[in-house]
Image: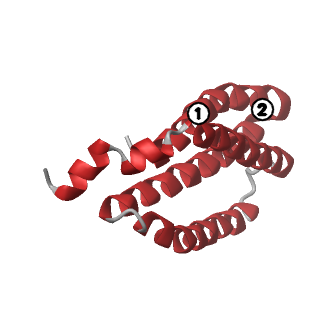
Amino acid sequence: MSGETRIVRGALVWGAAIAVPAVGLAYLLRGSNGAVSVGIASGLVLTNAAAAAGLSALAGRISTIAAAMISLPSFAVRMLLIFLALVWLEGQPGIDRPAFALTFSIGVMLVILLEARGWKRTPWLATTFGPARTEMEDGS
């Protein structure tokens, strides 16, 4: 398992687990538009986190520095796609803006917090330069 996957795994698992009751709570508090808005906001945040880790892990398989080289272009493309999604969603009548904005901002903060926790717990030297990684690159 790549370091990127180790970092984002907890955020995705906990984010998806929290999203389900959050949608139910939004339905009780804000109706069906609130539930749909919470679901969409959660999906955007979690999809972005998964895409970031996936692209970085894929680039890391090419070389150890490729993951760093792809990070800024990947970020720019992902932020552009999120911006376009937000612009499109703004014009949709079924979006509960306060529920969406609150869920999106809390979701981003939660993902960053859980990714930081995962980063702290990832043994970088072992996963990057350990015997298993060296053998894969040597073709042995």
Q: Quadrant of the N terminus?
A: top left
Mark 1 residue crowding within 10 angstroms, few (<14) / some (14–19) / many (20+): some
Figure disc tally: 2
Depicted 88 relative to depicted 100: above or below: below
Residue 69 x, y percent position in the rendering: 48, 72
Q: Looking at the image, what colour scheme do you see?
A: secondary structure
Residue type at numbered disc 2: Ala
13 vs 104, nearest the viewer: 13
Q: In the visual, does 21 lie left or right of 66?
A: right
Depicted 24 relative to depicted 68: above or below: above
Residue 105 x, y percent position in the rendering: 79, 49
Q: Residue at x 35, y 44 (%)?
A: 130
**Callout 1 touching callout 2 (CB < 8 Å):** no
Q: Residue at x 40, y 50 (%)?
A: 128
Q: In the visual, does 51 lie left or right of 121?
A: left
34 vs 101, nearest the viewer: 101
Q: Residue at x 83, y 35 (%)?
A: 30
Residue 24 x, y percent position in the rendering: 71, 26
Q: Earlier in the sequence, mark 1 or mark 2?
A: 1
Q: Residue at x 84, y 29 (%)?
A: 29
Secondary structure under tag 1 reads helix
Secondary structure under tag 2 reads helix
Residue 40 x, y percent position in the rendering: 64, 47
Residue type at numbered disc 1: Ala
The picture quadrant where one finds residue 12 is top right
Query: How far is disc 1 from disc 2 in space, using C-alphas?
Result: 15 Å
139 vs 79, nearest the viewer: 139
The residue wearing badge 2 is: 26
The residue wearing badge 1 is: 16
Mark 2 residue crowding within 10 angstroms, few (<14) / some (14–19) / many (20+): many
| Camera-nearest label, 1 or 2 | 1
